[in-house]
Image (cartoon, helix red, strand yellow):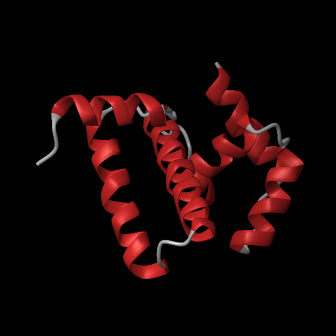
């Protein structure tokens, strides 16, 4: 299919952790070109979007979340997103606003705060 050293080189240039993600990048880029065309603007947007999503997937895969003591179904459903928003610098009140705006869920900021506190230690 592909030569091993070419995949390794692309993997290093894209700063991806494994070969499977590199091959996934190529497959998604091929689909993007078929759907959106191969203009410079389209390629720039497509490549940056695909790489951003692959890096976010890596972050989510590497994050271990402690959900054993969590009873709140909203926390269980949006745990990865809550952790990601916290890593981006948002506090519990801003996370509550984000969840309300983008997912239309209502949760107290104290619940978010306690969940984040339990994740730290």
Q: How many tags in the picture? A: 0
Of all residues, the one furthest to the top in this rendering is 121
Residue 68 shows in this picture: no
Residue at image location 51% in from the left, 49% down from the top: 51
100 relative to 51, above or below = below
State whether residue 120 is above or below residue 46: above
Instruction: State left or right for residue 90 relative to residue 37.
Output: right
Give the residue furthest to the right: 93
Q: Is residue 97 left or right of residue 59?
A: right
The part of the image, by quadrant, that contains residue 9 is: top left
Where is residue 46 drawn, in percent x and y?
Answer: 54, 63
Side (left or right) of 45 relative to 99? left
Q: Quadrant of the C terminus?
A: top right
Q: Residue at x 46, y 32 (%)?
A: 13
Residue 71 point in image, percent of width and height: 56, 50
Q: Whole-percent x and y of residue 54?
A: 47, 48
Which residue is at a point 41% across and 28% down the rendered structure image? 12
Res 33 → quadrant: bottom left
- Establish if 119 lies above or below 70: above
Q: Report the front residue among 72 and 79.
A: 79
Q: Nearer the viewer, residue 66 or 19?
A: 19
Q: Residue at x 37, y 77 (%)?
A: 34
Q: Is residue 37 visible?
A: yes
Question: Is 113 in front, or is 90?
Answer: 90
Task: In the rendered view, tell whether residue 75 sits above or below residue 61.
Answer: below
């Amino acid at each position: 299919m592909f030569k091993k050293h070419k995949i390794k080189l692309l993997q290093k240039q894209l700063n991806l952790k494994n070969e499977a993600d590199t091959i996934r990048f190529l497959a998604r880029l091929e689909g993007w070109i078929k759907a959106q065309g191969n203009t410079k603007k389209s390629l720039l947007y497509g490549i940056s979007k695909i790489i951003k999503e692959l890096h976010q997937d890596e972050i989510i895969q590497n994050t271990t979340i402690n959900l054993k003591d969590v009873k709140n179904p909203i926390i269980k459903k949006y745990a990865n997103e809550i952790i990601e928003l916290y890593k981006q610098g948002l506090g519990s009140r801003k996370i509550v606003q984000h969840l309300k705006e983008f997912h239309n869920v209502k949760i107290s900021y104290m619940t978010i705060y306690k969940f984040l506190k339990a994740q730290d230690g």
